[in-house]
Amino acid sequence: MELKMAAQILVHMVDPPEEGAEDTKTLVERLREAPHKIVEYHSDNAKQYVAHVLGLVMSYWPQAKLAPLGEGMAEECSEEDFAKFQEEAKPVAKKIVESLEQDEEC
């Protein structure tokens, strides 16, 4: 019974039931779908965060061409330089994520 209750909590967390809708799936079926729902949730959040950051870039540099970013890092950039750029960006990334989390709380 304790395992069933824990499973139901997990399932409701990753796939909350819609109000007024009757759930036709069993707990086992919903548990099997849970990993996909978690991945989908993270993917959606990542897309939202990246879009937010790119929107911030565009707010400062409206002429910036974002399309090449979808292809990965610039060919002339070494892996070492890219790793350095990422490290340098971490404090700013932390501030951006914190501001997004505050917006979600409001």
Image (cartoon, rainbow, N blue to C red):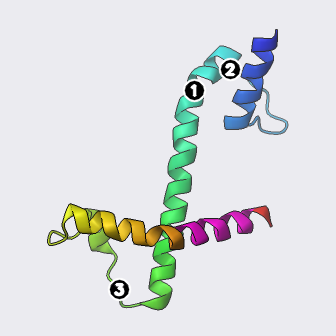
**Secondary structure of the residue carrying numbered label 3:** loop
Residue 63: name its quadrant. bottom left
Residue 5 appears in the figure: yes
Label at residue 33: 1
Give the spatial CA distance, label 3 vs label 2.
48 Å
Quarter location, residue 100: bottom right
x, y percent for residue 13 = 72, 36
For label 2, the crowd category at 10 Å Cα-Cα, with few meaning under 14, some 14 to 19 and many 20 or more, is few
Q: Look at the magenta stretch and give its main secondary structure.
A: helix
Residue lying at 77% horizontally and 28% vertically, measured from the top left: 9
Tell me: residue 44, above or below residue 97.
above
79 drawn magenta: no
Q: Residue at 57% of width from left, 21% of height from top? A: 32
Q: What SS does tag 1 mark?
A: helix
Which region of the structure is painted magenta?
93-104
Q: Is residue 80 above or below residue 27?
A: below
Upstream in sequence: badge 1 or badge 2:
2
Inspect the magenta stretch and tell me whether residue 97 lies in it.
yes
- Answer whether labels 1 and 2 touch (C-beta < 8 Å): yes
To which residue does mark 2 refer? 25
Residue farthest along the left direction in this orientation: 76
Residue closest to the eye, 100 or 26: 100
- The answer to whether residue 15 is seen in the rendering is no
Q: Position of residue 91 (x, y in %)?
A: 52, 70
Kindly check if marks 3 and 2 are in contact, taking CB atoms under 8 A apart as contact.
no
| Distance between the alpha carbons at the discs numbered 1 and 2 | 10 Å
The residue indicated by pointer 3 is: 64
Residue density around tag 1, few if under 14, some if 14–19, many if 20 or more, within 10 Å: some
Residue type for callout 3: Ala
Number of numbered discs on residues:
3
